[in-house]
Image: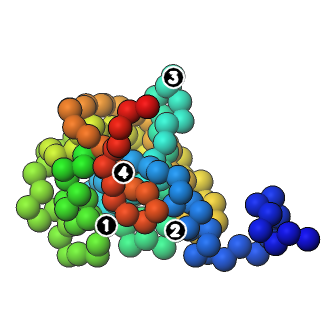
Amino acid sequence: MNMHNPNIVREHLEPRALRDVLGCFATGVAVVTTCDTDAVPVGMTINSFASVSLDPPEILWSIASNASSRNAFVNHGAFAINIMSAQDKDRTLQFARPAEDKFRGVDWRPGWRGVPVLSLAMATLECELKQCIPSGDHEIVIGSVKAIDRRSGDPLIFYRGEFSELGSTL
């Protein structure tokens, strides 16, 4: 039997090996934002964002079930997806790391239901929380889009565990 056959299904997948394979799928990068119960801005970097429906307008993203910011996203009932540009890699990293104030030095405005909308984002979707679906060690968050905006820029890409810029158009 050929042990290098890509069609072999293994019953137990090692998390690191699975992460490496998933990293072969290049994704955009966004910062999702909301407010906690005291109206303090909360944000985190994600690459698990996708469109669900155009009519009605819905999107989804996922959050770890044990994420420290999970309750803020679920309890506030609204969030913003801030799609980041390549020039804003450092600010995006600021939201990816644990910090007391992830919004330090970040220009933002209150959006729909007060959610923070980042001024530096190349596109934003302000959403009402529609549904959370537990799945494995994450929850899939579905939102109804209430407001959108976009600006020019080149997207920040995440590929094989690293930030990248968009290459040439095919």
The reply, left or right, for residue 138 in relation to residue 78 is right
Which residue is under mark 1? Answer: 96
- Mark 4: give few (<14), some (14-19) or many (20+) Cα within 10 Å: many
Q: Could one spot residue 62 in this view of the protein?
A: yes
Find the distance from the CA under tag 1 to the CA under tag 3: 32 Å
The spot of residue 89 in percent (x, y) is 23, 57
* Residue extending furthest toward the top: 55
Which residue is under mark 2? Answer: 65
Which kind of residue does numbered mark 2 sit on? Ser
Which kind of residue does numbered mark 3 sit on? Asp
- Mark 3: give few (<14), some (14-19) or many (20+) Cα within 10 Å: few
Question: Of label 1 and label 3, which has the lower sequence position?
Answer: 3
Question: Of label 3 and label 4, which has the lower sequence position?
Answer: 3
Q: Helix, strand or loop at disc 4?
A: strand
Q: Does 94 sit above or below residue 55?
A: below
Question: Of label 1 and label 4, which has the lower sequence position?
Answer: 1
**Which mark is nearer the camera, 1 or 3?**
1
Question: Of label 2 and label 3, which has the lower sequence position?
Answer: 3
Find the distance from the CA under tag 3 to the CA under tag 4: 27 Å
Q: Helix, strand or loop at disc 2?
A: loop
Which residue is under mark 4? Answer: 157
Which residue is under mark 3? Answer: 55
**Which mark is nearer the camera, 1 or 2?**
1
Who's the residue at 51% across and 61% down the image? 23
Which kind of residue does numbered mark 1 sit on? Ala
**Which mark is nearer the camera, 2 or 4?**
4
